[in-house]
Amino acid sequence: MDSNQGPARPVSRFAESDYCYGTGTLAMRVDRVDWSRPVLYDGENWYEVEGMEVAVDGREIGRRQALVRGRRLKGPPAARRA
């Protein structure tokens, strides 16, 4: 990690049933959630998430986008105040 970037974001882990598309648990440092365009899927809102996928041993695998079940994400700041 570049020392000018500051501390790394925490790693979020999503069960296979909580994201599209892939197999097994997805571990990633979430950089962005597109709260403006929810996707209605399986009766729930899902959101496009972008970040760095991380291996079990902590190695960075690479940039990753995924569609993640909304209830598995921390809501946008305005939603947490309501």
Image (cartoon, rainbow, N blue to C red):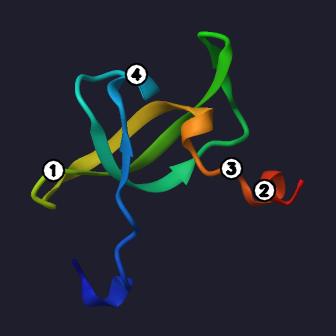
Residue at 72% from the left image edge and 53% from the top image edge: 76
Neighbourhood count class around disc 1 (C-alpha, 10 Å): few under 14, some 14–19, many 20 upward: few
| Mark number displayed over residue 17 | 4
Height in image: 35 above or below 21? below
- Disc 3 residue type? Gly
Q: Is mark 1 on a helix, strand or loop?
A: loop
Mark 1 to mark 3 CA distance (whole Å): 25 Å
Work out whether residue 47 or residue 56 is closer to the camera in this orientation and state it: 56
- Disc 2 residue type? Arg
Drawn side of residue 64 relative to residue 46, left or right: left
Q: Which of marks 1 and 4 is in front?
A: 4
- Dot 2 or dot 1: first in sequence order is 1
Q: Mark 3–mark 2 contact, CB under 8 Å? A: yes
Drawn side of residue 42 relative to residue 24, left or right: right
Q: Nearer the viewer, mark 2 or mark 1?
A: 2
Q: Count the labels in the image.
A: 4
Q: In which quarter of the image is the N terminus?
A: bottom left
Q: Position of residue 60 (x, y in %)?
A: 18, 58
